[in-house]
Image (tube, rainbow, N blue to C red):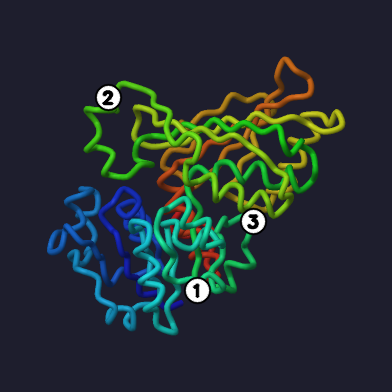
Amino acid sequence: MNQLSVLVAGSTGYIGVQLVKLLCKHKYIKIKYLCGNSSIGKNIYVYDKTLKKYNLPKIVKINYRYFKEVDVIFTALPNGQSQLIGNNLSKKNILIDLSADFRIKDVNIYKKFYKIKHKSKKLLIDSVYGLSELYEQEIKNKKIIACPGCYPTSIITPLFPLFKKKYLKINKVIIDSKSGYSGAGRTILKKEKKMNLFNSLTAYGIPNHRHNAEIYQELSLISKKIKFNFTPHILPMFRGILSTIYVEKKNNISAEKILNFLKRFYKKNKFIRICKKNMLIGTRNVINTNYCDISVCETNDKNKLVILSAIDNLIKGGAGQAIQNLNIKFGFNIDEGLN
């Protein structure tokens, strides 16, 4: 099979560098352009020394003329910029976007949460919400793949099938998520002294974290009456997310039944690992992988459960899921570039 030619826009952020590292290991990919704004002329290995062993192009300013030379464009850019790229795609381009630009289908909700007007409204028809395990068929058929946010990936993955099966009460959900600081991007380091970033745990985004819109959009496909409270936190570690989700069961359904259903639902999905009942999981087993680990835990209230969901925010919550979507789109082995 011939290699696909790729352009990466926003290649020097945490997600961008992680994406380049994974693409270098993908046997069907050739990176033709690495694009950035503040790093033009530099080598990408300035940001990660492990990339020095690869023959990679120097970073250049993005030019729409390049699009005719590549098959796939990855965008890991600030919100709003991928819309402009979308407006300039050539007929052969597939866009895999790691920003929020094509995740939210309602442009009014997008403007409410992201404070900018959407400039590619017509392209939303050609886009799919790229949660790999839930929308595989749609990913195969769309030109624009909007990779989910890191928190939503950890949250929607366990909740969507359980709500769809009607095993949980839809108005009794509390989500407590904790992430390494890389989830906030490189700019978070500028706030380090003010936040005491490396020595403290910080809650933020209450009550209107941007990912609320994304989580509600997907869960409301099951019921518009779904209600949840979502509180994100930044931990003094670099990467990883653990979401602790408090739910209430319906009709005295046992934890075993819920656990076995999740196992069946994700049986064919390599990157979803359903753990033993009451297993107290953490990020340690998912760091530097594309796995999502899920555990179902009983509580001292027989009607309530705690669902734990752990991912690496830069891989399953970002670059890894983007590669997984690439593999789905082009029919490669699902783990190509992700082992």
> Answer yes or no: do the residues labelled 3 and 1 have beta carbons within 8 Å?
no
Residue placed under numbered mark 1 in the picture: 123
Q: Left or right: where does residue 201 sit relative to residue 257?
A: left
Residue at 27% from the left image edge and 24% from the top image edge: 196
Q: Earlier in the sequence, mark 1 or mark 2?
A: 1
Q: Amino acid at mark 1?
A: Leu
Residue placed under numbered mark 3 in the picture: 134
Above or below, comparing residue 10 to residue 249 in the picture: below
Q: Secondary structure at mark 3?
A: loop
Residue 209 in percent (x, y) is at 47, 41
- Mark identifier at residue 297: none
Q: Secondary structure at mark 1?
A: helix
Furthest residue toward right: 251
Residue placed under numbered mark 2 in the picture: 196
Relative depth, front residue between 160 and 71: 160
**Mark 2 and mark 3: Cα distance apart in space:** 38 Å
Residue at 62% from the left image edge and 68% from the top image edge: 138
Q: Residues within 10 Å of mark 2 (few under 14, many from 20)?
A: few
Which image quadrant is residue 199 in? top left
